[in-house]
Image (cartoon, rainbow, N blue to C red):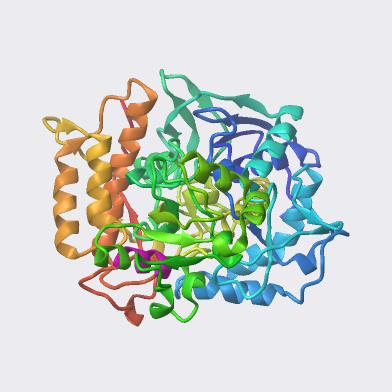
Amino acid sequence: MKGREMTRHLIVVGSGVAGMTAALDAVALDGSQTYDVTLLTKADLAQSNTRYAQGGVAVVIDAMADPGAPRLGDTVESHVADTLVAGAGLSDEETVRILCADGPAAMDTLIARGVPFDRHDGELSHGLEAAHAHARILHAGGDATGAAIAYALIDRLRESDVVIREQTTVVDLLLDPSPSSGPRRCVGVRLLGGEELRADAVILATGGAGQLFPCTTNPEVATADGLGMALRAGAVAADLEFFQFHPTSLDAPGNFLVSEAVRGEGATLIDTDGKRFMLDVHPDGELAPRDVVARGIAQQMARQPGIPVRLDATALGAEFLAKRFPNIDAACRAQGYDWGHVPVPVAPAAHYYMGGIRTDEWGRTSVPGLFAVGETACNGLHGANRLASNSLLEGAVYGSRVVEAIASPEPPTVFDEEWLAPLDLDLSDDPDADDVSRADLQQLMWDAAGLARNGADLQQAAAELRRWKSPAVTDAKAAEDANLLVVARAVVASALARQESRGGHFRTDFPHADPAQARHSSIGTSTVAQHA
């Protein structure tokens, strides 16, 4: 895909690894067509899920060009196989292969852009995480991989020709009011306050939706903005019932993430009697897939009852923990826990969204001119349950590919019938309804659409969500609340429609996987809605 004759002005919304990679690649393109790139972010550049990611980046280190890459006997096929298993039958093999095959080059690019991955005796350090057949996880700063990536890319952005606008809230996508033929095209964005920015293409890289729930590892900015805007613009979304709950967040205010890598190093989960209970749940124990471990913890907490389980890392020693996981060590100590000597309380928290705006393997959506990448997108890569440490890799790999797609003269993807016949999402609001309460919405979603769901609770949640309306968008919080309400309704509708249990979606009334439902879900709206 080498054409360079199309888009001239590109808007990127979001400043995680996916958005910053796309922006940097766009201004670095060679050829006759240059790109004017504007990157918009509603907070400062560092506020993203990328910044808070701890565990690392999964990559086949053997295939990297870096001379400090050790040879581990790992293969692309092994990484593909692990990703497909974690996806519980729903990962698209082509998108998985692209991720795993292109990952080594993407990591070489990150290193070239200044990401200081940890090394030992000159070789890249590598760790093991759950459901990986090899120790293929690169990390930086011990447990600060996301921050290392974010700050390196921010430095490159500030040196580049990208126009950066921080503290800038996008409230809606602009659509061509009168297309000559076919669906309406995305032609820009509308900002809080009414300013309109026009572009030949818009890339949504707005991250996840953890703020749908009261307990989440995500920062406050993760309010499903890209997905909410895309749904209002008529875009098709996919797999919205699949939300990954991280098994081990510190059971303390803030739900600080205790990385999977801690369990990869040998930490265990114990009940109130000090017994390891995960071996009774799954043969891989603490290193079972995340959805299995999260539900195992929740079930044990119910038996206790309600008392958090504990993560026992004492065998690793205080010195090792402080060196390997300095940020987790500091967070534990800030809460009064000396985790090198005493097990710490942990509980599941909303972590990663496998669903999102439906895209093809190049980031194209069903709306012409609109692209999506990273956690806000769903290209089928993660299926029903993301493999640990594939998310930062996804942003790096697909952040580059989306720019190639925009630069290409090839026609846009024609989505097949499965994706273009979605569940219909009603975007209308009762004008007499109360404005949505974020705290009430979050609690409703935790109770009805959290780790375990059932038809009755989901039906009740759907009715409750109809009793709220989107607030007038007069400030950034109101814009976020409007997006959370739209997406909450879509999540509940999707969870109701999938009458089985698979990956991150567990129905107590349908506790087993149904082979006949081993397919992606999709949802959209037959009408376009925008804020006044």
Q: Which x, y percent locates residue 79? A: 64, 72
Q: Going by the image, does 211 lie left or right of 40? A: left
Q: Going by the image, does 88 lie left or right of 126? A: left
- Reply above or below: 285 against 521: below
Of residues 162 and 480, the one nearer the viewer is: 480
- Reply above or below: 324 against 472: below
Q: Which x, y percent locates residue 291? A: 41, 66
Q: Is residue 295 magenta?
A: yes
- Extent of the magenta region: 292-299
Q: Going by the image, does 311 lie left or right of 480? A: right
- Residue for point 36% across, 30% down: 479
- Reply above or below: 202 against 479: below
Q: Going by the image, does 309 lie left or right of 361? A: left
Q: Which x, y percent locates residue 193? A: 41, 18
Of residues 255 and 429, the one nearer the viewer is: 255
**Mainly helix, strand or loop, the magenta region?**
helix
Q: Which x, y percent locates residue 19? A: 60, 41
Q: Is residue 198 magenta?
A: no
- Residue for point 80% across, 38% down: 32
Residue farthest along the front direction in this orientation: 341
User: Looking at the image, can residue 140 be seen?
Assistant: yes
